Amino acid sequence: MEKYIIYNIPLRGGDTSPIWSRWDMAVGVKALLEKYELAGTWLPRYDALCNPDYTDLCLSLDDRQEVGIWLEITASHAEAAGVPYCIDDGEEWFWAKHALTMGYTQAERRRLIDVIMERYSELFGLYPRVVSMWMIDSFSADYMSRKYGIKAVGLCRNQYGIDGYTLWGGWNNLLYWPSRKYIWQPASSLEGKGDFIIYPVITEDTLINYGNEKGIWSTEVSMMQLQNLSADHVISYIRQLTEHTLQNGFPVSLVSLVVENSWDWGQLAEAYERQASHLAALHRQQVARVVTVSEIAGTYTQTYPDLSPAQIWYQPAGIKNPLLDSACITVCTRRYRARMRTDYDGTGLKMTDLRVYDEDETDPYWEEVSQGRFASWIIPFLLDGSLYHINGSSDAPLIDISSSEPTYLALRALSGKGSEHKERLCRLDEHTFLWEEERFTAEWFFGDEEIVIKTGSRFPGDTIGFELVCDCTLPEVSASKEGLSAAGFTEKSDLIKAAQIIVAGRHTPDVSLDIRSLDQQEILAGDWTALGEVSRLMIRGEQEELSLCLRPGRRPISFKEQTAAVWC
């Protein structure tokens, strides 16, 4: 398994007000990387490329370092490109309409890119291989690749609404070949692939960062310590997250760290030094290699020259955070992303997030301009557990789902008592996980295009069912009859019988989940139960034990013989 660590250092000049540029922090980070002999990727913004202090710093870096670009738009950058730039009263410079490339027309984006590339070339005698920013629209990334030959584009982690940037439903903590027309999703064909690699600027905690409104649970020291957490707590947590991430990513493990020169170095220096010391130890002990972004991009493109392989994150319990007994699996393939979670509290292993990628989809900002505070990339979903908030505090991690009001999928024993908390999750191989409860076991295999579940009962007479809980009183249901769609099942007592059951979302009807038995001839039965504000569809087979094939899709449902469809 390949294991890498990359260190990103965005450099801001003095353009923005209030000034988010701390020279002492830039100098301090440079000293740390030199002291611990660590590689780093420095990412100056346009105003930093026009500041003699920052240009001298970049030109004096040792051979372990590289210099790319931080494509955050500011006043001097827009002025140099001849692009209108005006922050009205009540607005902030970091709003999407000002700071992001998608806040400008295609013609303006080209001018903004051309002027920063020429400035970079004047200083370094070539064009950069790495361009990063919290969000960069797909048109701009494609333009930079075609004209300037960039090899890697850095984007933010998955987050919802922080600083006006929403990136939701993308691959977590992973390198990938992107879809050329929509870089927030992976390419599924050579014809639709971009000519550069996407990488995350920050590594997130896939367990507790999901649903957290402040997005603080990651490898970013400053975001955590600014929450008034002690340096000891921050470093202990980040060390464990770093080591867990390196151990549990397949086939490539990547930890990405970011250090913006925008904070009080006196407050943060101790934590950053301890982090640098830890990274140096991991590198020295050959646990992982600390490399530049260009180096890992080059290795990745040589190892996977065509398309990105499916990658599955397993974050077991044990990281020092407020949810010590929870674990999650995040499955990233070219077709879908799925999230499984257990809190080891007797409620089982639940699928709380499922969304589907479609290479035919185009970035909403390919041509459109973001004209307000927010810009959003949200991959269409069937399940999104982050919508359901149980904890009222935005500082605390939010539980994905509760038993009373979210939407999720799970296996259940339909007779006997519950699991009484005797639960265990373990990884069998790169794609397969074993879930054990008191009354049954289940093997989950996550393939490139489908998910296969095989259950085994521990007690004679026990029946295993597959549960869909919907956040509505009664979903709409249709069934086929002789190949034609027919409305039906309008009463809670109705029973579905079909060889194929398709679940689709009310709000995203083109996203669906095809549920079939592994035995193609077996008829599945599904019945409804009202649970207060929600309803439950329980699917069972003709045998006590259940074996299913789940296939996520993004096409309109076409009814065939023995098909039932559910909109939830």
Image (spheres, rainbow, N blue to C red):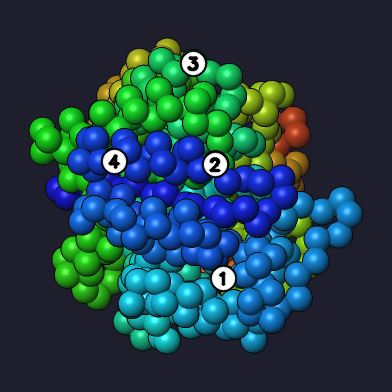
Please name the residue that numbered disc 1 is placed on: 137
Please name the residue that numbered disc 3 is placed on: 230
Which one is nearer the viewer's eye here, 31 or 499?
31
Q: Amino acid at mark 2?
A: Arg
Pointer 2 and pointer 4: residues touching (CB < 8 Å)?
no
Q: Residue furthest top?
A: 420
Q: Secondary structure at mark 2?
A: loop
Viewer-side label of 3, 4: 4
Q: Residues within 10 Å of mark 1 (few under 14, many from 20)?
A: many
Q: Residue at x 47, y 38 (%)?
A: 25
226 shown above or below 83: above
Q: Secondary structure at mark 4?
A: helix
Q: Is residue 50 visible?
A: yes
Please name the residue that numbered disc 4 is placed on: 33
Viewer-side label of 3, 2: 2
Pointer 3 and pointer 4: residues touching (CB < 8 Å)?
no
Image position of 456 (left or right of 386): left
Q: Residues within 10 Å of mark 3 (few under 14, many from 20)?
A: few
